[in-house]
Amino acid sequence: MKPYKNKINRIRTFALSLIFIGVVIMYLGIFFRKNEIVMLIFMVLGMLAIIGSTVVYAWIGLLSTKAIQIACPNCGKQTKMLGRVDMCGHCREPLTTDPTLEGKEFDEAYNRPNRNNVDAKENSK
């Protein structure tokens, strides 16, 4: 299983990779200079990837302003948290805002709405 990272950092990494992918796609279009239609298609696809990156950056910026800022108990630095459970952006300490999840093993599924129903059923038994 891959190591879990802070949600905000994962989305920012995805947006940055979209920029590089867009540049590579446009660069590949240079190899088709003799066929202008194919070159234009590569250039447009690359530009769409870069525009998509801009949209993702704007979206995560809006999410980041609404995120809860908390101090990590492990490293003491301020970090932003999305959802009920997340990782510290600095030291990858599991964090939660839900007191019922304190001490439980970290699971990203706690953020999904369906997971709340599963937890309620387990607690009622």
Image (cartoon, helix red, strand yellow):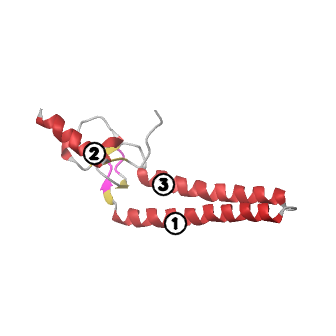
Q: In this view, does 32 lie above or below 121?
A: below
How far apart are labels 3 and 2 at the CA level? 23 Å
Label 1 belongs to which residue? 55
Kind of residue indicated by mark 2: Asn
The residue closer to the viewer here, 53 or 79, is 53
Tell me if label 1 and label 3 are in contact, CB under 8 Å. no
> Element type at marker 3?
helix
Examine the rendered structure and indicate whether residue 124 appears above or below residue 67: above
Disc assigned to residue 74: none
Q: What element carries label 2?
A: helix
Identify the mark nearer the N-term, 1 or 3: 3
> Which residue: 39% across, 63% down?
63
Q: What residue is drawn where x is 60% and y is 56%? A: 18
Q: What residue type is labelled 3?
A: Ile
State the quadrant of the C terminus: top left
Residue tagged by mark 3?
11
Residue 83 appearing in the image: yes
Which three-letter amino acid code belongs to the residue tagged 1?
Answer: Val
> Magenta span covers which residues?
70-76
